[in-house]
Amino acid sequence: MRLNLLQIHKIKSAVKAIFGDKAKLWVFGAQLGDRQRSSDVELYIEAESFGNASIQKTALLSLLHQEFTNLKIDVSIREPQQMLTDLHRNAIQNGVAL
């Protein structure tokens, strides 16, 4: 994984601040390959309950963009009642839980 420990800490802290202590977080995609050149960070989040998921996603992206101006960050959120999609399965199976 190409994210360093400080970046990981900042991402985890932001997710915790927005989604709470019980949120589960994975990073997946290009950031996992040390040889790949993409600077995209793909995050997958599950939480037991959400307020308004789209508002929370916007708040998280705002926080993360303040910290990481040089990275493109994509966030996928699975709400509790939502069925697993292929993207969700891929993130869980091939991603790294943070």
Image: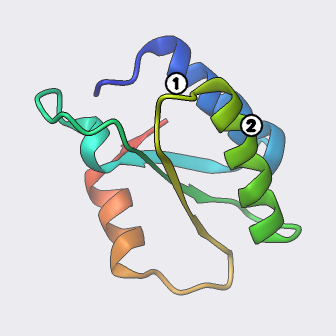
Quadrant of the frame with the N terminus: top left
Q: Quadrant of residue 69?
A: top right
Q: 46 or 33: which is nearer to us?
A: 33
Q: Quadrant of residue 21?
A: top right
State how many labels appear.
Answer: 2
Horizontal arrangement in the rendering, residue 26 relative to residue 55 (left or right):
left
Q: CA distance from mark 1 to mark 2?
A: 14 Å
- For label 2, the residue is 63
Q: Quadrant of residue 49?
A: bottom right
Q: 22 or 12: which is nearer to us?
A: 12
Point 33% across, 79% down: residue: 86
Q: 97 or 10: which is nearer to us?
A: 10
Instruction: Tell me, for residue 57, which label it has, or none.
Output: none
Q: Give the mark, 1 or 2, whose residue is nearer the N terminus.
A: 1
Where is residue 23? Give x, y as percent.
Answer: 68, 50
Horizontal arrangement in the rendering, residue 25 relative to residue 53 (left or right):
left
Where is residue 82? Give x, y as percent.
Answer: 61, 84
Instruction: Tell me, for residue 8, which label it has, or none.
Output: 1
**Residue type at numbered disc 1:** Ile
Horizontal arrangement in the rendering, residue 76 relative to residue 40 (left or right):
right
Where is residue 36? Give x, y as percent.
Answer: 15, 36
Point 65% across, 36% down: residue: 64
Residue farthest toward the right in the current orientation of the protein: 51
SS category of the residue bearing label 2: helix
**Residue type at numbered disc 2:** Leu
Give the colour scheme of this rendering. rainbow
Q: Is residue 76 above or below residue 39?
A: below
Do tag 1 and tag 2 residues touch (Cβ < 8 Å)?
no
Point 81% across, 46% down: residue: 18
